[in-house]
Amino acid sequence: MTVWKRGPGTGPHPPWKVILLDRDGVVIRDRGYLGDPGGVELIPGAAAALRRAHEAGWYLCGLSNQSGLGRGLFTLGDLAAVMQRMEDLLAADGAVFDAFHYCPHAPGEGCECRKPQPGLVREAGLLEGLDHRSWMVGDKLSDVETGLRLGIGAILVRTGYGETSLQAVRDRWSTNPPFAVVDDLPAAIGLILGAGETDA
Ligand SMILES: [Mg+2]
Ligand SMILES: [Zn+2]
C-alpha cells in the first residue's frame, strides 16, 4: 500500500537513479511494531545522508514490511501518524522521500508484497526496467534479498537488526556476501554516491 507518492508524474530521473530503503533500523530506530509516533527516532545522520542523496539526483523510495497491521498490533491511523512524525523529522533536516510503500500483511497471509518479494517495487512503478545501478539498503536479509532478486546493488547496515543479520550472513556466505556491509545509512549513502562517481 502507498503511504505517499509526491505528485503525478514524479519518478526517478534519470531512471536508473533509484535507492530503495527499508525504514525500521535504517532510517529510524527499530522499536518493533512501532505504532506510536512518540517512538520515532532518526538514526543519527540519516536525514543529512538522505538529503545528500536527493541533491545528487537519486529517487528515494521507502519499502517497509509493516506486519504489525496484519497482526492487529496497530492501526492504519497509527502507521500514518508514525510516518508523519518521521517525515517531519526528516524535513527539519531538508530530507524527503519521493515515495513510500508498505506491506500491511502478516507473514502467513501469502501476499506478494512482503519483502523479499517484489510486490512493493511493482506497486512503486519501478519494477519494469529497473536499472542495475539502483540500490536497496536495509538491516535484514529480506532487504538485501530484495535487492539481489532485482539484480541491483544491495547494502546491509549494522544498525537496527543488522548485527543479528550478520550472523546469518556469515552462516550463508562466510566472509564473502554478494552485497556490501556498512555501519549505517550515512555510510551506505556514502558508498552509493562514491560508486556513482567512479562510474562516471
Ligand atoms: Mg528494518
Ligand atoms: Zn503484503
Image (cartoon, rainbow, N blue to C red):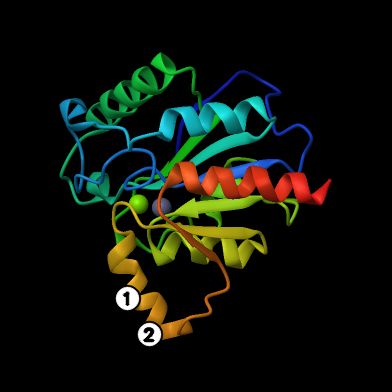
Given the current orientation, which residue lies at the most extreme top position? 92
Residue 187 or residue 83, whichever sits in front: 187
Residue at position x 39%, y 80% in the image: 170
62 sits left or right of 42 in the view: right
Q: Position of residue 195 (x, y in %)?
A: 70, 51
Please name the residue shown 28% across and 67% down the image. 164
Q: In this rendered view, identify the residue nearer to me: 19 or 1.
A: 19
Q: Badge 2: few (under 14), some or many (20 or more) residues near its Cα, within 10 Å? A: few
Quarter assignment of residue 41? top left
- Amino acid bearing label 1: Gln
Q: Nearer the viewer, residue 137 or 200?
A: 200
Residue 159 appears at what percent x and percent y? Answer: 32, 52
Q: Residue at 18% of width from left, 38% of height from top?
A: 74
| Quadrant of the drawing holding the N terminus | top left
Q: Position of residue 109 (x, y in %)?
A: 33, 61
Q: Quadrant of the C terminus?
A: top right
Q: Which mark is residue 133?
A: none
Disc 2 marks a residue whose amino acid type is: Asp
* Residue furthest right as drawn: 200
Residue annotated with mark 1: 167
**Horizontal side, residue 177 vs residue 8: left or right:** left
Q: Are marks 2 and 1 in contact (CB under 8 Å)?
A: yes
Numbered disc 1: secondary structure: helix
Residue 117 seen in this snapshot: no
| Front-most of residues 110 and 35 | 35
Determine the CA span between mark 2 and mark 1. Answer: 6 Å
Q: Is residue 162 visible?
A: yes
Q: Is residue 113 above or below residue 14?
A: below
* Residue 11 image position (x, y, % from top left): 69, 30
Q: Report the side of 68 relative to 17 (left or right).
A: left
Question: Secondary structure under badge 2?
Answer: helix
| Residue underneath mark 2 | 171
